[in-house]
Every structure is written in structure tokens, then in C-alpha cells.
Image (cartoon, rainbow, N blue to C red):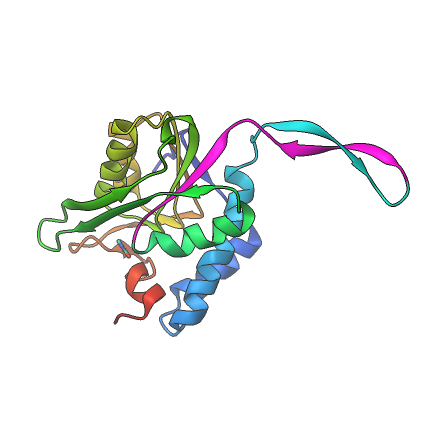
Amino acid sequence: MKIPESVHLIEHPLLKHKLTMLRDKNTRSKEFREITEEMAMLMGYEVLKNLPLKKKKVITPLERTTGWQISGKKLAIIPILRAGIALADGLKKLLPMAKTGHIGIFRDPKTLKAIRYYHKLPKDIKKRLCILVDPMLATGHSAKAAIDILKKEGAKTIKFLCLVSCPEGIKEITKYHPDIEIYTAVVDRQLNDHGYILPGLGDAGDRIFGTK
Ligand code: URA
């Protein structure tokens, strides 16, 4: 597929290496969760590269100088429950000052439709740069529903971070939310009939939490 401009394919040897470890069906849950967090941190570097800065005076052990401090926009990290939690945990290590919102969505295994069951967001979500996270952009129904919720609650700037995407999910988001920037480490081939990404890495939630 021709990748739309709103999609940032983050390619780095470390990400490719770690992604292959996630794909491996023999990677155990603890390692899977840790690698997911690490990938979130590495990708966060790209997602956050335009954060505004302000000057800050600082005294080193040798002299006074001027450095930089992140300023301006406040941040909100919003995992789509439950698989998004591991990505959010990684990002929060980079951004301990960010607030966390949660959006609970599961997909109906028969219809693959997104069923929303919960959301709790920071009160001032309108003023925050929202980083919505879910490891897999598959049908795109959950991400679309989560973005619908964020926009309804007044969020103005939303970026979506995933590890693995596919053409179907990218089409869904760019169709309904062309303003949303998508960050992904890979665009896989396709979805299977059950809504799983091929070659993919299986069910990210089950693998992160060891529930299968
Ligand atoms: N969700 C997952 O966890 N894996 C997929 O392949 C698709 C959706």
C-alpha cells in the first residue's frame, strides 16, 4: 500500500530487532511486556520530537549556562485497555509529568465491532496533547472509537501510537480521522478473517498479561 502522509513509519534497527522478538511465539509474557515498554520509549522519541522548549538557566559544577526545558503543551497518555497499558507504562517513564486517561474498548469476536465500556480522562483534556496508544492497529474500529471519544470530550491534538499496523486499519483511521497522525513500527500484510494481523504477533493483550 502507499502509506498516507499522516502515517509515520518509524524504522530503526533496534525497533526491528525488538519487534522480531515480539513476533516470536516463544517469547514469554514478562519479556513481551518489557520489550513492548522499551519500544514505546524508542518510538516516543519520534512522536515527541516537536515538543516545544523554553530556555532554562542552569548552574553546572563549573559555570552558569542556559539549557532547555520542555514547555507549553501538557500531555496525556491514553491507553486503550487493556493491551495499551504496556505502551503507556513505557511512555510514562519518558514523561513522568504526563497525566493518564483510560479508554476501555473490546471487540466483539463475531462482528469485530468496537464495544466501548469505560473511559476516564484528565479533566483538562482539551488543553493536552493526547497520545493514544494500542499495540495493534488491526481493523481500526477500536482506535476510531477511541478517537471519537477523545474528540467528543474536546481533545484537539491527538497522536496515535501503535507497534504493528496493517492497510485495513490505516484506511479506517485515515477515512474517519484524517487529521490524526499515526506512528507505527511496521505496516504488516493484511488481516485474517478473525481480525488478526498477519504475520503480526498474535493477541497482544493475552501475550502482555499471560492470559492464554
Ligand atoms: N489485536 C491483537 O492483539 N492482535 C491482532 O493481530 C489484532 C488485534
- Relative placement, left or right, of 193 versus 88 is left
In the image, is residue 90 above or below residue 5? below
The dominant secondary structure in magenta is: strand
| Above or below for 74 versus 90 | above
User: Could you tell me which residue is drawn at 15 percent across and 54 percent down?
Assistant: 193
Q: Nearer the viewer, residue 141 or 51?
A: 51
Q: Nearer the viewer, residue 29 or 73?
A: 73
Position in image of residue 91 (x %, y %)? 49, 48
Inspect the magenta stretch and tell me whether residue 71 lies in it: yes
Residue 141 at x, y percent in the picture: 21, 41
In the current view of this chain or complex, which residue is farthest to the right? 62
Q: Is residue 192 visible?
A: yes
190 in magenta: no
Q: Viewer-proximal residue, 151 or 20? A: 151
Residue 11 makes an appearance in the image: no
In the displayed image of the protein, which residue is found farthest to the front? 123
Q: Which quarter of the image is occupied by the N terminus?
A: top left
**Residue 65 locus on image (x, y percent):** 83, 33
Tell me the quadrant of ligand 1.
Answer: bottom left
Residue placed at 86% from the left, 34% from the top?
Answer: 64
Q: Position of residue 118 (x, y in %)?
A: 21, 46
Please tell me in which quadrant of the rendered image residue 196 appears.
bottom left
Residue drawn at 63 percent across, 29 percent down: 53
Residue lying furthest left in this view? 110
* Quadrant showing the C terminus: bottom left
**Magenta-drawn segment:** 63-81
